[in-house]
Amino acid sequence: MEKDSTTECSNPDSASSTTQASAKTPSTAEKPLLSAEKTSSDYYFESYSHFGIHEEMLKDAHRTGTYRDSILQNKHLFQGKVVLDVGCGTGILSMFAVQAGAAKVYAVDSSDIIDFARSIIEENGLSEKIELIKGKVEEIDLPVEKVDILISEWMGYCLLYENMLETVLVARDRWLDKTTGIMLPDWASLYIVGIEDFEYRASKIDFWDNVYGFKMSCLKREALAEPLVDVCDAEQTMTSSACVCELDLLSITKEDLAFTSQYEITAERDDTIHALVAFFDTDFSFGQKRSGNPLKTRSRISRDDPTQPRQYRLTTSPWTKPTHWKQTVFYLPNPCDLKQGEIMQGTFALKPNDKNPREMDIDIVFRHTRRLSDDTDETLSSQTVPYKLR
């Protein structure tokens, strides 16, 4: 999902065509699809063809800067290596890899933005180092049997929206060296935290209770079922946070991308919890043990040990400057008043939608409890909500 952009480049139609890798169904790839024949994946790739979405990603300094620093501050790992960039977009990560000393970079993307990427690569004199391949990872072939490093910016809202990680895992299994291969990033974690959000909930959810004197309960249910992607103010957070998913990208399988996790968060002050907020971290740890607080740390996370790679963390937490991913907000149907020390616990279940796997179905159980002893809880209220991240 590498969504980088440029606003100044030559018209791709006037340039020679981008390299097309041999596909399993070349005749289908060459034939334009009618609207009725297009799949969710076709529309997904089309959405990344326009430069505007890439411009937004490039201007996200924390996102792009973290990738840049993890590559350029570890040049010794890239010197003379073969790199695969999955979802290359404008090719910004591929160009960072060449700056770091990579011998060859294969940059793959299925959207038409790759035609602009070719112009960008040529404009910067990097055509001999970077080979652009237009096509789907599942269908193309590379000119090499294995690569040393796999880089990709695959993260979506709530970490897994758009399900691009599954494609990255296909690339890993097909080409990454199984003994010494490096992935960037190589670890991802998804967290939740409770927030107070009375004013916004009143304007977006409770609005449907009285619309010019009429009740519109069916639309209120729809509004509740669709998580909101927005920036959460750190002052709104009123509970501890909990990790609901950890992914070791070098070892997970696509089955791990659907999960059910137990969580428990504790009220840090007397307040009303209106929603759970999801955010994620991704680590560029180079196979080392992760260090530092995963929730409130930005940028570099390693110590100044010259014998070790420099580790970095990309975080989307509400306690740091917002990124283009913002946070994902799940409103409770019935807000709960929590006393300091009281607990919200339950399950967080996420899976790709059956009809469109790029969308996510998320079921959350909210259980408000009071801890009576180390092994006894009193349940004060409970609610289960199915959400649709579309």
Image (cartoon, helix red, strand yellow):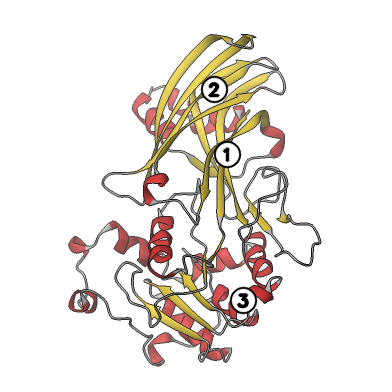
Q: CA distance from mark 2 to mark 1?
A: 14 Å
Compared across the picture, whether 324 is left or right of 351 comes to: right
Is residue 210 in view?
no
Q: Residue 189's spot in the image, x, y percent?
A: 56, 45
Label 3: which secondary element: helix
**Nearer to us: label 1 or label 3:** 3
Q: Is residue 67 above or below residue 215?
A: below
Q: Amino acid at mark 3?
A: Phe
Instruction: Measure how far apart labels 1 and 3 are at the Cα level.
Output: 31 Å
Give the residue at mark 3: 78
First along the sequence among labels 2 and 1: 1
Q: Position of residue 316 (x, y in %)?
A: 62, 49
Find residue 44 and report its horizontal and vertical position in percent. 36, 61
Q: Is residue 340 above or below residue 118?
A: above
Q: Earlier in the sequence, mark 1 or mark 3?
A: 3
Q: Which badge, 3 or 2, comes first in the chain's sequence?
A: 3
Q: Is residue 364 visible?
A: yes
Q: Judge left or right: residue 327 versus residue 386.
A: right
Secondary structure beneath dot 1 equals: strand
Q: Real-space Cα distance between discs 3 and 2?
A: 44 Å
The secondary element bearing badge 2 is classed as strand
Q: Are marks 2 and 1 in contact (CB under 8 Å)?
A: no
> Between residues 179 and 230, which one lies in front from this camera angle?
179
Residue at x-position 52% and y-position 67%: 181
Residue 345, label in figure:
2
User: Pointer 1 and pointer 3: residues touching (CB < 8 Å)?
Assistant: no
Q: Residue at x 49, y 22 (%)?
A: 366
Q: Which residue is mark 1?
A: 191
